[in-house]
Image (cartoon, grey):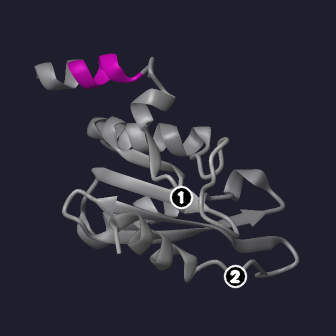
Amino acid sequence: MDIWEKMYEQAKRHYHPQDLSPFVYANNVVAALEAEDGQIFTGFCIESCSGVVNICADRVAAINMLVNSGQTKIKRMIAFRDRPPYGAGSGMPCGACREFFYQLNEENENMEILVDYETRETITLKELMPYWWGKERYAKAKEK
């Protein structure tokens, strides 16, 4: 079992779409992250009638990583609905999640994001956001 299969299996356990209330729907997108030290953290999405309180599965997994290990660096990520990523943009983190990952740790630009489960094709956050606006701020912080 390779790391992608291991991450897929751990995330898949959380996939069971459900209405938590007449306003909140959850578990229809799941994710797993591999932290810098090799630990795997999972998450599931929570969506509501008010979009500002929605939170994506990938951000929940990152928050679980931070809360449970104090880590901010992500090596790999997989996200999916009812089947593993199959190319053509499936499994890609949304803009808010991409931004969160970059802001959490600059080195997350090198994290591998699974594009296609069958072929194991990946893309990096840096490839998704080649001209990220925050690079200058990270550079200034290193000067201090």
Describe residue 2's horizontal placement relative to residue 11 as left or right: left
**Residue at 40%, 61% in the rendered image:** 33
Q: Position of residue 143 (x, y in %)?
A: 12, 19
Q: On the image, which quarter does residue 102 sit in?
A: top left
The image shows residue 31, relative to residue 138, as above or below, that is below
Q: Quadrant of residue 27?
A: bottom right
Which of the two marks, 1 or 2, is nearer to us in this view?
1
The quarter of the image holding the C terminus is top left
Stretch in magenta: 134-139
**How far across and down, in percent of the image, does residue 141 sit?**
20, 25
Residue at 61% x, 43% y is: 94
Q: Which residue is mark 1?
A: 118
> Which residue sits at x=77%, y=81%?
18
Give the mark nearest the N terminus, 1 or 2: 2
- Which residue is label 2 attached to? 16
In the rendered image, residue 101, in percent from the top left (x then y), is placed at: 42, 44
For the residue marked with disc 1, what is the amino acid?
Glu
Residue 22 as seen in the image, left or right of residue 115 = right
Secondary structure under tag 1 reads: loop
In the depicted view, which residue is nearer to us: 60 or 49?
A: 60
User: Rounded to the nearest whole Å, what is the CA distance between mark 1 and mark 2?
Assistant: 22 Å
Q: Main secondary structure of the magenta part?
A: helix
Outermost residue, left direction?
144
Above or below 15: residue 143: above
Instruction: Give the residue type at disc 2.
Output: His
